[in-house]
Amino acid sequence: MQKSDNKQNTKSGFKTLLLSVILSSPGPLILGIGLTIGRSSTQISDFTRRSAELLAIIAAFVVYLITNRDNFDEDRKKKLEKKSNIFVGIIMCISGISMIIMAFVSDTGDKGNVLPAFVIALFGVIANTLFWRKYSKLYSMEKNAILGVQARLYGAKSIVDTCVTLTLLVVALWPGSTFSHYFDILGSIFVSAYMLRCGIKTIFT
């Protein structure tokens, strides 16, 4: 019975990771296209973040597939999971650093149309919160290190997307204003700092 439950949990983990990859894939592409009409600091930062996170999610999915095969060596499994989680943490740190750089070197003029980025961020709040709860539930049942880090990643993503959504809403409502300009920069700094914090915590946990 226990073995059957473990297989069911592994199957559920596989499906959740696969769905994460599928739903995360269009984000960078749509935001990249959106950058042709919008130049918000937060929008540029969000594009960089989502591209890095997609790479981390794909890596986690591949490692989960490899380490959950039947009769896979337990020691090798732990080593691969640790390397994968460190990689995810490094990606989060690189993402955070690149975002804070973008915040200070991007154009301070007209931000253009940020609506596509706003829609993506709003969708991200909903989707990432659902994934965060799903991964947390799976981790509590399976105690798999990959799923635990994904729970932390999606918890961070949901908070960051909330911040990005609010920032882009301000930029859209008051385009070109001094208030929206500084709010945009503050949004980028908050996102960067939070991603750095989560990345460092992931690497050393």
Image (spheres, helix red, strand yellow):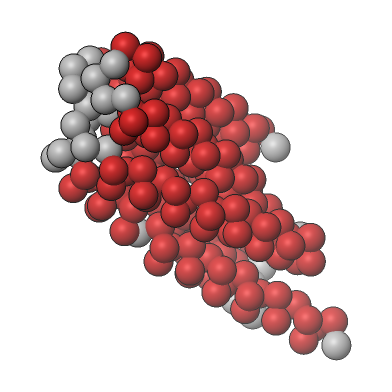
Q: Viewer-proximal residue, 56 or 74?
A: 56
Q: Is residue 94 above or below residue 6?
A: above
- Does the image show residue 197? yes
Residue at the limit of the structure toward the left, as seen here: 36
Picture quarter with the C terminus: top right
The residue depicted at 52 percent of the width and 57 percent of the height is 127
Image quadrant occupied by the N terminus: bottom right
Residue extending furthest front?
173
Is the residue 195 above or below the residue 69 in the image? above
Q: Is residue 83 visible?
A: no
* Residue 160 pos. (x, y %): 51, 37
20 up-or-down from 10: above or below: above
The residue positioned 57% from the left and 49% from the top of the image is 154
User: Would you say 79 lies left or right of 4 here?
Assistant: left
**Given the current orientation, which residue lies at the most extreme right position?**
1
Residue in the picture at 37% in, 14% down: 179
Q: Quadrant of residue 182?
A: top left
What percent of the width, then of the height, locates residue 196? 53, 27
Toward which corner of the image does residue 158 lie, by quadrant?
A: top right
Please tell me which residue is depicted at 48% across the width and 41% down the height of the picture: 161
Q: Would you say 60 lies left or right of 12 here?
A: left
- How far across and how far down the image is residue 21, in percent? 43, 62
Question: Count the marks: how many?
Answer: 0
Front residue of this view, candidates 53 and 34: 34
The image shows residue 169 at horizontal and vertical percentages of 39, 35
Q: Is residue 50 above or below residue 182?
A: below
Q: Nearer the viewer, residue 24 or 117?
A: 117
